[in-house]
Image (cartoon, rainbow, N blue to C red):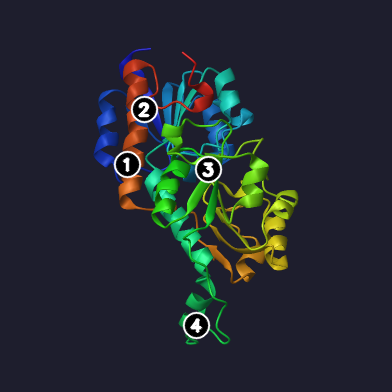
């Protein structure tokens, strides 16, 4: 197929890197779907409306139009489509195994999100440890710290932070936490070199959840990590543990978390992600010791711009070289 007929589809919106996106028009025709729902999108594919599309740039919010890129949707995509560039670090919205079967390569944005997400992570750790949430609400109600005032909070200094998932965000968080005097230990699917882990102590999963004062969830969501933290795991934790999740909501069983908070097993928690976003568990909303942030880990101008530029560079690389700049780990060894 001649390069003049190649097409790149935008699923979602470009908010910042407009010039970089338009520059791709030198290599391919840039199009957007007419569909506004999953059913319409699948029909548009099946009717040939997207024939000639070789690469797709997709955003997290495009889920509202296409739904999950699962086997049903992937089987409907035009045969010309060979690359999916996902604008995010987490890519659980895309069934990579089904893409691989169809010969479609998938990329993500693995490092541009690290700093901003770890910042929110540390913000939630500090807020949950200090127990700031009840008094911030009381202040807005004209009640100063609250009547009665809340219990005293806790300092981060000397606390053991257990990082569950020592990827880029986890490693970035380690540096920030150590600046606050915390000791960091981690569990990962593979032990890292001392250089990569920064000297953090590698422990088993059970040791991490049973000995950490604060537990941070920084692992991807997949079939093996869904509800990796549930009732059985909460039972093993220290009484008064603090939990923070900036990964994906479903790595933790929210029903079990609410019960652990209500029983006092978990002192407080900080959440940026939820099992059924944008719906929030009523037990979390009702608990004043839960800090809630509406999935804003990467919600900065600088990070969003960097993510878009990175994702555009994946599309450009696909068009110019036939390979993605940052393929997802599951496809890293594929030609």
Q: Residues within 10 Å of mark 1 (few under 14, many from 20)?
A: some
Q: Quadrant of residue 289?
A: bottom right
Question: Mark 4 vs mark 1: which is more N-terminal?
Answer: 4
Q: Which mark is residue 145?
A: 4
Q: CA distance from mark 1 to mark 3?
A: 21 Å
Label 4: element kind = loop
Q: CA distance from mark 3 to mark 2?
A: 19 Å
169 sits to left or right of 43: left
Question: Mark 1 vs mark 3: which is more N-terminal?
Answer: 3
Label 3: element kind = helix
Q: Which mark is residue 306?
A: 1
Mark 2 lies on residue: 315
Comparing labels 1 and 3, the label whose residue is closer to the camera? 1
Q: Residues within 10 Å of mark 3 (few under 14, many from 20)?
A: some
Q: Is residue 275 visible?
A: no
Q: CA distance from mark 4 to mark 1?
A: 39 Å
Comparing labels 1 and 2, the label whose residue is closer to the camera? 1
Q: Residues within 10 Å of mark 2 (few under 14, many from 20)?
A: many
Q: Residue at x 56, y 27 (%)?
A: 96
Question: Mark 4 vs mark 2: which is more N-terminal?
Answer: 4
Label 2: element kind = helix
Mark 3 lies on residue: 63
Q: Nearer the viewer, residue 197 or 280?
A: 197
């Amino acid at each position: 197929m001649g390069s003049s007929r190649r097409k790149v589809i935008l699923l979602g919106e470009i908010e910042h890197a407009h010039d970089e996106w338009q520059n791709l028009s030198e290599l391919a025709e840039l199009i957007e779907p007419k569909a506004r729902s999953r059913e319409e999108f699948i029909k548009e594919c099946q009717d040939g409306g997207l024939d000639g599309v070789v690469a797709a740039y997709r955003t997290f919010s495009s889920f509202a139009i296409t739904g999950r890129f699962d086997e049903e949707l992937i089987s409907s995509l035009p045969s010309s489509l060979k690359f999916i560039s996902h604008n995010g670090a987490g890519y659980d919205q895309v069934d990579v195994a089904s893409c691989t079967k169809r010969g479609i390569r998938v990329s993500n944005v693995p490092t541009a999100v690290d700093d901003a997400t770890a910042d929110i992570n540390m913000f939630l750790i500090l807020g949950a440890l200090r127990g700031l949430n009840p008094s911030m609400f009381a202040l807005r109600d004209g009640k100063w710290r609250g009547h009665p005032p809340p219990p005293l909070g806790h300092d981060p200094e000397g606390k053991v932070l257990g990082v569950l998932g020592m990827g880029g965000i986890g490693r970035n968080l380690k540096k920030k936490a150590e600046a606050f005097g915390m000791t960091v230990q981690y569990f990962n699917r593979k032990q890292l070199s001392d250089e990569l882990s920064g000297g953090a102590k590698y422990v088993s999963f059970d040791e991490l959840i049973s000995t950490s004062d604060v537990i941070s969830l920084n692992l991807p969501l997949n079939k093996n990590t869904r509800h990796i933290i549930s009732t059985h795991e909460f039972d093993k934790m220290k009484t008064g543990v603090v939990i923070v999740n900036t990964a994906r909501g479903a790595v933790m069983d929210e029903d079990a978390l609410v019960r652990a908070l209500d029983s006092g097993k978990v002192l407080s928690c900080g959440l940026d992600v939820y099992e059924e976003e944008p719906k929030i568990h009523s037990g979390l909303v009702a608990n004043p010791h839960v800090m809630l942030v509406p999935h804003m880990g990467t919600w900065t101008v600088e990070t969003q711009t960097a993510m878009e530029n990175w994702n555009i560079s994946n599309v450009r690389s696909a068009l110019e070289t036939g390979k993605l700049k940052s393929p997802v780990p599951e496809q890293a060894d594929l030609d």
